[in-house]
Image (tube, rainbow, N blue to C red):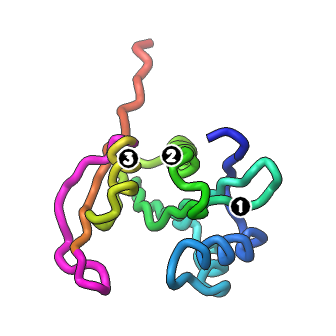
Amino acid sequence: MTGFSARKLGEGDIPALLALERQCFPSSWSEGQYAAALADPCFHAYGAFSDRGGMIGYLALSLAAGELEVQNIAVLPQLRGRGAATQLLRFALADLPWERAFLEVRPSNAPAVALYAGAGFLAAGRRKRYYSDGEDALVMTLEASPTPKDDA
């Protein structure tokens, strides 16, 4: 997708995060939950912003001991399918020092499964009745590419 930029989010982005979540999900975190999360050094959030400056998507992750967990990704409904989620995911994976990444996704969410598979994530198992409606979660993982070592 052209016409947007990505960057790490901070406390000043909470109102835009809340507004975006309300357009994408039936329930969202509170302002206090985001403030606490953004103050946690293990939590990382990235936003996609239109060329006009408005947030069109975000990605939330946690990173501890080299393991990166993709917690949430959202793009405004009217802008889905244009590459913003792919670019956000690539941006975050390149920005953070991780060795292994994992996530849970609804198997019925074909666009999300395709997004993660396209980024190299592989199905690794299921969590039975993971979601509140009883749907299982598909667990997907990704191993970081080894960094080439100097021979000198």
* Residue 88 lies in the magenta stretch: no
**Residue at x 51%, y 49% (from the top left corner):** 81
Residue 99: mark in rendering: 3
Percent x, y for residue 36?
A: 62, 81
**Residue at x 47%, y 66% (from the top left corner):** 72
What's the CA distance linking mark 2 and mark 1?
15 Å
Percent x, y for residue 137?
A: 25, 69
Relative to 104, say whether 83 is above or below: above
Q: Secondary structure at mark 3?
A: loop
What's the CA distance linking mark 3 and mark 2?
19 Å
**Residue at x 26%, y 78% (from the top left corner):** 130
> What's drawn in magenta, residue-wise?
119-135
Q: Earlier in the sequence, mark 3 or mark 1?
A: 1
Q: Secondary structure at mark 2?
A: helix
The residue where tag 1 is placed is 55
Which is nearer the eye, 63 or 142?
142
Q: Quadrant of residue 48?
A: bottom right
Residue 86: mark in rendering: 2
Q: Earlier in the sequence, mark 2 or mark 1?
A: 1
Amino acid type shown at disc 3: Glu
* Residue 130 lies in the magenta stretch: yes
